[in-house]
Every structure is written in C-alpha cells, then in structure tokens.
Image (spheres, grey):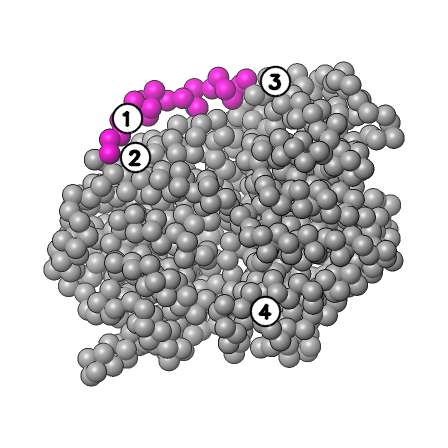
Amino acid sequence: MTTKSAAAAARATVYGYPRQGANRELKKAVEGYWKGRVTATELRATAAELRRATWRRLAETGLREVPTGDFSYYDHVLDATVMVGAIPDRHRAAVAADPLDGYFAMARGTQEVAPLEMTKWFDTNYHYLVPELGPDTVFTADSAKQVAELTEALALGLSARPVLVGPVTYLLLAKPAPGVPADFEPLTLLDRLLPVYAEILADLRAAGADWAQLDEPALVQDRTPAELHAAERAYRGLGALTDRPKLLVASYFDRLGEALPVLAKAPVEGLALDFTEAAAQNLDALAAVGGLPGKRLVAGVVNGRNIWVNDLEKSLATLGTLLGLADRVDVSASCSLLHVPLDAAAERDIDPQILRWLAFAEQKTAEIATLAKGLTLGTDAIVAELSANRADLASRAGSPLTHDPAVRARAVTGADARRSQPYAERTAAQRARLGLPLLPTTTIGSFPQTGELRTARADLRAGRIDTGGYEERIKAEIREVIGFQEKAGLDVLVHGEAERNDMVQYFAEQLTGYLATRHGWVQSYGTRYVRPPILAGDISRPGPMTVRWTSYAQSLTDRPVKGMLTGPVTMLAWSFVRDDQPLGDTARQVALALRDEVDDLELAGTSVIQVDEPALRETLPLRAADRPGYLDWATEAFRLSTCGVRPDTQIHTHMCYAEFGDIVRAIDDLDADVISLEAARSHMQVARELAAHGYPREAGPGVYDIHSPRVPSAEEAAGLLRTGLGAIPAERLWVNPDCGLKTRGWPETRESLENLVTAARTVREELAGA
C-alpha cells in the first residue's frame, strides 16, 4: 500500500468511550451519592480519576488525540441542556440551589417535580433525556464542564478534542415543553442558540482546544429541505467565527445522504463519517461531491456498535480509497464506543478460541491504532497483526457454532405466522375465559430485584449455596410477590421474575448459539447497566425456560398469572448480533425457539402470555426507505413466536421509551391482543397516537413512571387514566406502569401500585355513575 508523507501521518482517535470504569466505579459512586454514602467531593474525585485513567489508556494504545467532554454522570444530552442553559422552569430552583442535585433532579425527578422525558438515542439501547423547549426559552452559555475536562486532559500532556452535541441535532432531539403547543418546532430557536455555541467554542479555544467536535447524528435521518437549510446556516455561521477551534462535524449510525453536500461545502475544517457496512454508501457519496479538498476526514471504519473483530484488510482497502478524497484521513470507530463493553480480556468464561472473535472498546482502540499505523507506514509495518486477524476471522467462519443444520432445516411457512381466528373473535373468547373487570390492572412483569436476590445469585455462582437452597429463595420471593399483588387488588398478576438476571440474558443463557459475558457491561441509562449477550451462532431451545416458575406462581392464586417472555426483535436488539447473515434470518431462529416456549406455557395452563418487544421501535432503520423490509421480518418474527396459541389465550406485548407514532401500523400487524406502552412522562401522547391511527386492540398506556423514584399519587394516576380514556374506549383500556419494576425499591413499588389500583377503581366508579 502506498502511503502519504510523514507530515500527513494518520491519527488514531475515537469519538467517545465507556464511562463506567473497569468495575463500574461510576455507577457505585453516583448511587452512593444518591443514598448519602458518598459526598459530592468524593463523587467528583472518582469521576476525575476515571477520566484520567481512560485518557492515559487511550494514549498508551496509540491514540494521538483523545476525546473530552463525552464523560457524563448521567447523560450527555442532559449535559448539553446544562451547557446551553435550557433548564426547565420546574427545575430552575433546584439547579440554582445545588447544580449537582438539580442535575440529578432533571434526570430522575423528585417527589415534587417530574423529571425530563427519557427516550432512545436513535436506534440504540442508550436512553437520553429529552430537552424541553418553547418560544420563550432563553439560552445561556455554561462551558464550565467542557473547559474543565479539556484542561484536565491537556494537563496530562495529551492532545485533546472536546466533543459536543451539535446545535442542529440538539434542537431536532428536543420537544415542546409542557404547556407549549405541540406544533412548536424547536429548530426555530436555532438563531437564538448559535451565539451560545459561539461563546462556548471561544471558551474552549481560550482553554487550549485546537479542534472541537460537534456531533450531528440527526443528519443521517431523512431531513426536510428546511432542516437541511438550517444545518447549512448553522455551519456557515459557526465556520465564519474567528475565535474558535477548528471544527470537526461528526455523523454516525447511517449514511449522511442529502446532508453530505451541505456539510462538505460548509466552512468547517473536518468531517467524521461512518464507513461501516451500515453506512457504506458514504464512500460513493463522498466521491460524488468531489471529496473534501483541504479538509480533514475522520473515517469510522471500525464498528463502534458491535463486538466482532474488524476485518483489517477490508478496512485498509476502504482507507486507501479515501486517501484521495481528503487533505488528510484519520482513523476512528464508526461512533462513540459508549455502546460496547470495556475489555474482552476480562472475560474468563468464554472459550479462548471464541474470545479471539471479540473486540470490546479496549480491543477496538487497538484495531484503530493498528489501522492508522498501516495507513501511514504500509502493510509491512503490521504484518503480524494482519496475520493474526486473518486467523481470527477464519476461525469464526469455520466454527460449527455458526452453522447448525438442524436449526436451518426447520421450515417456516406463511401459515405459521398467523393466528387461527381474527382479533374480534378472539377477544370475546378471552373475556369469557378471564372474567376481568373494566380497566383491568396489571404490571409489566418484573418486581424489585432486591440485594438479597442478587446475593443469592452470587452465592449460587460461588458455591456458597446449592441449587436447592437457591430455588427455595426464589420460591419465597414469588410467594411474596403474588401475595402482595392479591392484597393490592391487581387483576392480572406476574410472578415477578426473581430468577432472572436480565430480560434478555436470562433467555440467552438457556438458548444454544448465545454467549454470556461476566464483565460486558454497557450503559443503558444513568446508572443502569446491562450485559448484552452475544448472538454468535444458530439458535435453538434445548428445553423449557419459564414454565416451571410461571406454573408455581399460578398454583398460589386463582387470578391469572402472565407468562413472561422477551420477543425475538428485542432478543436481537439488546444483544450483540451476528453480522454474517441477514438479521431477519436470525430473528426467525429466535422466534421459533420462543414459539416452543409459548406452546409449553399454554399447555401448562397459562391463559395470558406476554412477549415483550420494547426494541421494535428503537431498531427501526433511521432512513424511511429501509423501514418496510425491516418491519416485514420484525412483525413476522413476533407473530411466528405467538400465533400457535388457542383463541382464548391472550397475547400481550410491551414497548417502552421510544416514539411510537410512526409504527402504529406495525404494532397492529403484530396481532397481539393487548399492548402496554410507556406514557407517563409523555403525558399520554401514545394514547393519542393510537387513536389517531385507529388502533383497534386493547392497550395499557402507562400511568406510573418507573424510571423515577417518585411515587405518583392515586389522583395523579387517575388523571392520566382519564386522559387515556379521551383516546381509548374504556372496554379496551388497561391500567399499568410504564415498564418493569426491577430497578425500583419495595416501599415505593408497594405505594405506587396501591395508588394505581385505587386510581383504576376511582375511574371505574366514575364511569359506572356517568
């Protein structure tokens, strides 16, 4: 491979990095602060040490430019809200009294004040706090966090690049504040916001920033001419500033499309583009606009969202093509490494042969450094790395784990994915069988995972208790959960999922083809971390996974107990999926395994079965042209897993923390009998969306926000329920929380659910007396 001169040596960099630390030190420190066990000074010291350790490690690996400002105590979009002074009115007093406590109040709420709405960050499982804006919003610059973290990195002698959420993406992610007309468009505030960004950029330049990165992932979505014009105006204005660092505008998660020529022509010094398979069209599009003469291109050739080793030779070929399209080409991951675990070397339970296939954040930074070295010095400089990489790729391709003839031989026909009777006929049979009241109450599935439960699982793994002792502990927890629900007056019960470590991992550990990690933590939101399993091979179910515990719970009560499963799309979305076959093929394999479980639950007498698909919306492709194909296989996979049951068996599904209005038709196509949805923070928006689309089935828009520790009063829940009734008829409306209760404590759970039941009874009485 020919290379450029030493003056143009390719730099290795990343857009962001996991925040939690090797042992989730940040989670422990933040939660300790909330509980009063950790002081603010101690929390800040822990955070500062985590940042320093990350930057040092990146530099040691070979990254010549480290990101700053991507660290967050809770969420980087919330950090941007603080940076531009867009504090909601209801939180201003708390932020003024104590900025740190006010910050967490915006994220989590208090008993008196509701938090900001939370939703998914594009098509990932990361949740961000939605900015609330209105025509009266006044922006003010607060660059303290960005300047302080840049100063920390520079003090270590490192080349550092501050990372900010870009102004266009910030406004496109925002929503009208409560009380502001729903048709208000936050993007109309752009001219008010840009001077604030100008002030922040000037502060960063004064603090020593040579470059600043402005993230604009919203521009990879379909955008109107007005939105593209706004982007052009924004970067024409920011680019014209004289007192600023050089500007690197970053996009990721998909192709930039019609926004590429806008940014290519903007007076900024660099662009960062995704060149992984998901955004391969960026390469041709970049050539079509004549490249980036005189500018820096940061090429995202290492997949920042999945955990498979990079094909180094393929990436080098892409980088070689890009050399002629920009003044300089640097190497990065396709997006922030926030979306992958920290270090595969920490895994001791995965077969060493299979471990060679995996690259977490630590390994990806090494791949980036290797590619930068190869691009600069030629392939002769990385012969050993290329040889090892070829062997790793061949090992995976030839493994029997990735190809199970028995799984692939299981045929699927169109008739396998449809219920035997239409919904109108099924619902009459289900109502006769279940005998539920108007506005039936239920929960989403999980109950609090107490410290005692986590200790019991740890004791089992360590051999301190045997299987019999562990199972007795689970039975005791199920008895407590069932007893509480009966006493509280809930109508359809759950067993509480005491035996489950995670709604995806629990099933993955019982299916062939999946790998589980011990230390593969990834941030979902705030201090909530998950360990996504790795979908490495063909999927099958060796035996029943949930029947025993569901049947035990049902033996304790005369009320219906829901069987609880995680749907095929969510099993993919919340795992690291294989990239060597189409996603639809993998989804059908998972669906057939779940179908076997559904059939066994029904055979055991389960009358209500919930198959959760919270990821259906989040996995929706960012470009409209790509959505029909995805929705075809996604909805088929759900139906394939559920359609074999009798007409009088009620199928539920659940979705949360996403925008549902543009997939209501697909939700209907799932052919579930009942759907429960997040609605509390968005003030029943989803109920109105269902009504606007003529959704014909039963629905439970949540009346209790479980992602906040605050306890909603019975009247508050009743008020939301009355709002829901304005969109959904009473005979089709269920009463439930927004999501599972796993992360909540027992005291708040008891009080909140008792209030929920009281609210349902109150509104029933109002309807009866109307």
Q: Which residue is mark 2?
A: 592
Q: CA distance from mark 1 to mark 2?
A: 9 Å
Q: Nearer the viewer, residue 193 or 578?
A: 193
Q: Nearer the viewer, residue 420 or 137?
A: 137
Tag 4: residue type? Answer: Leu
- The structure residue drawn at horizontal position 29% and vertical position 67%, both measured from the top left corner, is 728
Q: Position of residue 305 (x, y in %)?
A: 57, 39
Q: Which residue is mark 1?
A: 410
Q: Position of residue 751 (x, y in %)?
A: 39, 73
Q: Which residue is mark 3?
A: 390
Indicate which disc, 3 or 4, sits on the residue closer to the N terminus: 4
Residue 409 is one of the magenta-drawn residues: yes
Give the quadrant of the C terminus. Answer: bottom left
Hey, which quadrant is residue 401 in on the image?
A: top left
How packed mark 3 is, by other alpha carbons closer than 10 Å (few <14, some 14-19, many 20 or more), is some
Tag 1: residue type? Answer: Arg
Indicate which disc, 1 or 2, sits on the residue closer to the N terminus: 1
Judge whether 552 appears above or below 386 on screen: below
Query: Going by the picture, which residue comes out furthest to the bottom?
Result: 769
Q: Does residue 770 appear to the left or right of 622 in the view shown?
A: left
Hey, which quadrant is residue 98 in on the image?
A: bottom right
Q: Nearer the viewer, residue 51 or 658?
A: 658
Judge whether 654 appears above or below 737 on screen: above
**Helix, strand or loop for disc 2:** helix
- The magenta span reads 394-414
Tag 3: residue type? Answer: Arg
Q: Which residue is mark 4?
A: 133
How packed mark 4 is, by other alpha carbons closer than 10 Å (few <14, some 14-19, many 20 or more), is many
Q: How many marks?
A: 4
Q: CA distance from mark 3 to mark 2?
A: 34 Å
